[in-house]
Amino acid sequence: MLVEKSTTFNCATIYPSLCIRVDADIGTTITMNVAEFRKRGKEMVDYVADYMEGIHRRQVYPDVEPGYLRPLIPDSAPQEPETFENIMKDIEQIIMPGVTHWHSPYFFAYFPTASSYPAMLADMLSGAIGCIGFSWIASPACTELETVMLDWLGKMINLPEAFLAGRDGEGGGVIQGSASEATLVTLLAARTKVIRQLQAKSPGLTEGAIMDKLVAYASDQSHSSVERAGLIGGVKLKMIPSDDKFSLRGSALRKILDEDKAAGLIPFFVVATLGTTPCCSFDNLLELGPICNKENIWMHIDAAYAGSAFICPEFRHFLNGVEFADSYNFNPHKWLLVNFDCSAMWVKKRADLIGAFKLDPLYLQHHNQESGLVTDYRHWQIPLGRRFRSLKMWFVFRMYGVKGLQAYIRKHVKLSHEFESLVRQDSRFEICAEVVLGLVCFRIKGSNELNEMLLERINKAKKIHLVPCHLQDKFVLRFAICSRTVESIHIQQAWQHITELAAELLKEGKEQKMN
Amino acid sequence: MLVEKSTTFNCATIYPSLCIRVDADIGTTITMNVAEFRKRGKEMVDYVADYMEGIHRRQVYPDVEPGYLRPLIPDSAPQEPETFENIMKDIEQIIMPGVTHWHSPYFFAYFPTASSYPAMLADMLSGAIGCIGFSWIASPACTELETVMLDWLGKMINLPEAFLAGRDGEGGGVIQGSASEATLVTLLAARTKVIRQLQAKSPGLTEGAIMDKLVAYASDQSHSSVERAGLIGGVKLKMIPSDDKFSLRGSALRKILDEDKAAGLIPFFVVATLGTTPCCSFDNLLELGPICNKENIWMHIDAAYAGSAFICPEFRHFLNGVEFADSYNFNPHKWLLVNFDCSAMWVKKRADLIGAFKLDPLYLQHHNQESGLVTDYRHWQIPLGRRFRSLKMWFVFRMYGVKGLQAYIRKHVKLSHEFESLVRQDSRFEICAEVVLGLVCFRIKGSNELNEMLLERINKAKKIHLVPCHLQDKFVLRFAICSRTVESIHIQQAWQHITELAAELLKEGKEQKMN
């Protein structure tokens, strides 16, 4: 631990050039000065590189039991500073044994979370700049790069012009922390819009009376965050049955809209999902969109996982119908190599968002804010503060190039089809939903109990990690291509491992029957 | 740009040890492999160190006009990868000219945002682990370190035992992204609680009918995010006049509660602020708390900025009365050297939070979740995903030690009193609110117009950066001690600069009167 006396201000004489160099942290002691940071920072870069390089050797899923960590560390913070070496020692001894390694090539659970070296480099820079970009003036570069990066990304997926900010558009993009926030923010904007419209017509109507009648819709395959947005927004959220391909169809929406309107309810918001969490199915935008437009219902599209694939022309057709939507969201932090958090959201009319949230205390006002060119992103989101996250997009887009990103998506899709084909070659197993992108839903032909036991054995063996889902009352295993470094060999190993565990299970079952 | 052929899988033969080393990113090309990351990561560490070391030489506040950035970069993402060198060149040429340097020792605007080398190191590690810790199993270390760090921090500020998780407590802490989210989450929890209570008594009552009557309260000095939480939650939020010291008092709350209850409204939520944004005033917890408890009103305390100071025994008395609160929040990412985002929030009864948000789809369920030791933080917050942010707290608390952190707070408070004393020595100026922590509210004795002109000149000169506030119709300048590296010399320079500009202004005013 480096402790130095406070630096003397030897530049003080050259004021007024305002050039004073001060390293002193806290008056008389320096906990970590810049020289120490240079040293430790480089050590950390090597630690990170070693971690990424050796991650396939770590057990993907930890052995620890709940409560493992507390006994390993002191009950309270130390009074005196500790050394960096001590802390780094504890990383391997205390932290790593409890880490689920999301970037291991043996991690096939949930959906991917993005990780790439360019994004990590950008995040280091973002941490150093450390601006809180809630308004344009609080750091113009932070706001403006974000607007332009969302335009870049919008063009990469061929989003209709109306969603782009451009130089004088009414729409535009913003980085949210997560798809949950995007759904919530758009639901709230839609709620505000419809309440204002109804109160304009009938000034006597209270907000509560309207909210009692408001109803939002999503497919029964939609993410739990959609239901949560309804809870938070204080409105009904109805789950509409999807069809046999787990897709929400226009006819199903039409039916419930007619029923609800007849019952005096006020439909105002529909979430269509592209790439559902259970099985990566796609709602039918071309059927849903015209209905929403006709009924004056805000259509939000949640493509959290699948959205990244739309940078490939061969997958772009899933997004057809986005022209009917009011807002669109997907997570580059899932599948586009931009580390968490970076959820991209676009709206056609930014005034709808801003109108729902704008409050302007004096300490947050600034001269430029009435200019059409100025975006104050605090009006677009739940929190006030925000990090300089667009740097990650800028680094990743430029260092991979669109072609590199497309190649990355295609590699994952190819690997999922490889796994699918292994499953299909084994008559003991079945594929449970069409494999379109990087997710394979499969199961042993047999009871749910059998499949639950298989999953339990997989996750107890801890060589790979999977999570399940339910599809039409069937307990199904989800095999998601996740890691940046996953290759064909890992898929083959995983399948061999799964079939070995399945064979054991099936053998035990037969033996039990015989006894 | 390094482009290599795909690595051959030369370890494949040693399966089943599951040891395959793969660097190949996207099949046939590597955009940035681990060797390149080691090199570029170390260059970035030096860039960051250079930036921090030389930040006092950069103009604190940028010269750019709205829309400056778009013409400087291409209209769309490149198809082919670009080099790291190109990107780094653009950082200085395109990004830095548009950055407001929040960590410059000449930045005195808003409130501080934290920055320290230990936090930056921890963030590098967090980015590499890159787990999404929404549930215990999604990364046990991520969840458990957070719970213990919030206990550490709670003990540092001597928070009542009821707020700590401990081994079997009913309370506990969580890291939110911002104080705005903490206020929103607690308001929603309080809303759910009161709605359930009322519906249990009167099952016929609709949610909308109840929400029309719900009313929350905060001081007229509270942050705009409180009003926003009311908007989002769909409930009335009333701003109660504060006293002549900008403090919300029990008598004022009592009065409006009586009026509102007589009018049939249902008070359910009070936000007390410790360290208001305009002038760092403190609401009177010891008066407000017993009223809230008696009236069955959820009391949330927002100490976003001031809360860090409570680690010093001499400032802890401001928190007296927290024992009456249901939830408490402050931002270590403001003043406790933990880089954004890291907003610490505690609740006495975590069941109240979880009850408001819990939804459990199969793909997020896990075996351990019913154990009392398991915390699934996704039920505590708006987003689902979350970064491994507690590492930042762990690094900072250990590398500074409590004493180092206390010294840091005390240094800032000393500097604000130094500035206060400079203002008080100049009879042309007045101090507008008691200086308690790191904020000085001051103005020229005279009209609001004069002070607006002074601020405009300060922010045009761009040697220092300030923002204003209104205090009882007076336009006031806020001088906040912000930077980790700010020293007495910067305060003196800032004051000399301000008085020079003020003198010019006053001279011009006199000359105009004479003409």
Image (cartoon, coloured by chain):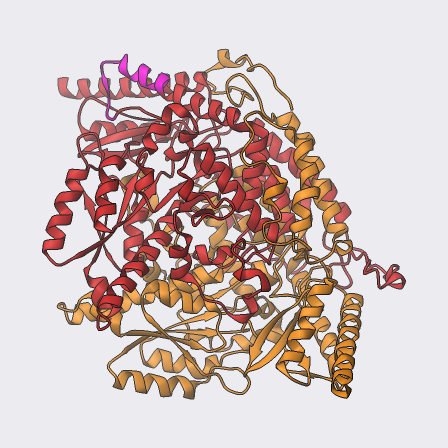
Chain colours: A orange, B red
Please name the residue shown 54% across and 12% down the image: A8
Residue A15 percent across, percent down from the top left: 46, 15
Left or right: B295, with A111 as reference point: left
Q: Is any part of residue B130 visible from this angle?
A: yes
In the image: residue B270, left or right of residue B465: left
- The outermost residue toward the front is A515
Q: Is residue A239 above or below residue B375?
A: below
Q: Is residue B42 above or below residue B168?
A: above
Q: Along the horizontal axis of the image, is B88 left or right of B317? A: right
- Answer whether residue B245 is magenta in the image: no
Task: Indicate whether residue B428 is drawn in magenta.
Answer: yes
Residue B346 x %, y %: 41, 45
Image spot of residue A57 (x, y percent): 78, 54
Q: Quadrant of residue B204?
A: bottom left
The N terminus of chain A sits in image quarter = top right
The structure residue drawn at horizontal position 36% and vertical position 60%, both measured from the top left corner, is: A350
* Residue lying at 55% horizontally and 82% vertically, measured from the top left: A473
The residue drawn where x is 74% and y is 80% is: A423
Residue B391 coordinates in the image, percent (x, y): 58, 42
Q: Quadrant of the C terminus of chain A?
A: bottom right
In this picture, which residue range is highlighted in magenta?
A: B417-433
Is B515 on the left-hand or right-hand side of B355? Answer: left
